[in-house]
Image (cartoon, grey):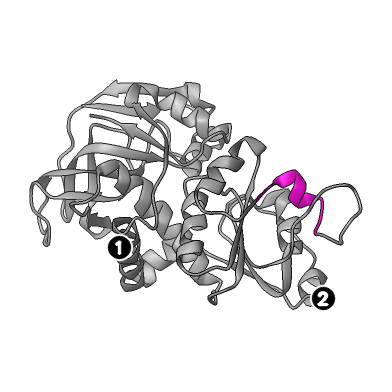
Amino acid sequence: MRRVRCHENGGPEVLRVETTDVPAPGPGELLLRTEAVGVTLPVVRKVREGGLALPASLGGEVAGEVVALGPEVTGFAVGDRVTGVCFADGYAEHSVLHSAMASPIPEHATAVDAVALVRSGLVALGAYEAARPVEGESVLVTAAASGVGHLAVQLAKARGARRVVGAVGSAAKADFVRSLGADEVVTYEELNGGLNGGPDDGAPGIEPVDIVLDAVGGELLSPALAALAPGGRLVAYSSGGGTFQAYDLLVGAKAVIGFQMALIARHRPALMEQWRHELWELHAAGRVRARVHAELPLERAAEAHGIIEARVNTGKVVLRPV
């Protein structure tokens, strides 16, 4: 089978397509014929910055057909269509997925739908839930055109948010974010300019919001926090870091909440299954649609990573191994 590996850290150019044997599933594992792979920023960053044991085959969000079962597998059969996260050989024609990480793909959905919706949608829905939203509140979503962010915008609207603001790195993404149902779109530069009634520097700013879902962090964390109305909540779910002054929380009685999907998967699997069911229901009803920026073959994995690094994607970037 063909798979993508990297033998050194660096940019997209370090990715190589190699040929190797099809793996055999171990205890509790499923072997998939991989139909779609979701490319994510954390994997792209690991290739660029380190964190992988080299030479590395890349994990990721995968979807496909079960072609073999390992010992001790229950609840799945050959021919099932499933999606989940694997930690190696995700960018490959065949992937090994632990059955505990797998979930069925409904008949109304494709493999591309699954990798674009499920993992990113779980993060988006989980981050929104972490804010303990109340119907009729207003929400700001940073990285609103990303694989997670574009779903967060739709989920906030579907869950009854009165006003949803999308924040993007480039004004070129504004029409895309509005097409998702966002009531307003601002650039990071505009957000950093302050709120209406804030610094008089010519930036339009925005009216304060009740909830911020922040997938960017870094230098955007402080202006995102400033965008909160008194009593507002910011949910941080990025790996971008960032700092703020405790006084900024005290003066507005604001809260910052950290969210990590891995903790939910480990400690609250029933809740994750509940969220997954809700996502598929919303998808079937047409209320949440996973948008795909590009579908590329394995040979163009470097191009897929380049799109993510350049932050030009509107929606999900997907590899199609077969």
Type of amino acid at the residue the image marks with label 1: Glu
Q: Is residue 170 visible?
A: no
**Horizontal and vertical percent for residue 113?**
31, 46
Q: Is residue 193 visible?
A: yes
> Could you say which disc has been placed on residue 251 in the image?
2
The answer to whether mark 1 and mark 2 are in CB contact below 8 A is: no
Q: Which residues are magenta?
A: 185-195
Q: Is residue 304 above or below residue 184?
A: above
State the SS at label 1: helix
On-image quarter of the C terminus: top left
Q: Residue at x 45, y 25 (%)?
A: 302
Please check the rendered image and state whether residue 264 is part of the magenta-colored stretch, yes or no.
no
> Could you say which disc has been placed on residue 43 in the image?
none
- Could you tell me how far apart the alpha carbons at marks 1 and 2 are, in whole angstroms? 41 Å
> Could you say which disc has been placed on residue 281 in the image?
1
State the SS at label 2: loop
Q: Is residue 150 above or below residue 222?
A: above
Q: How many marks?
A: 2
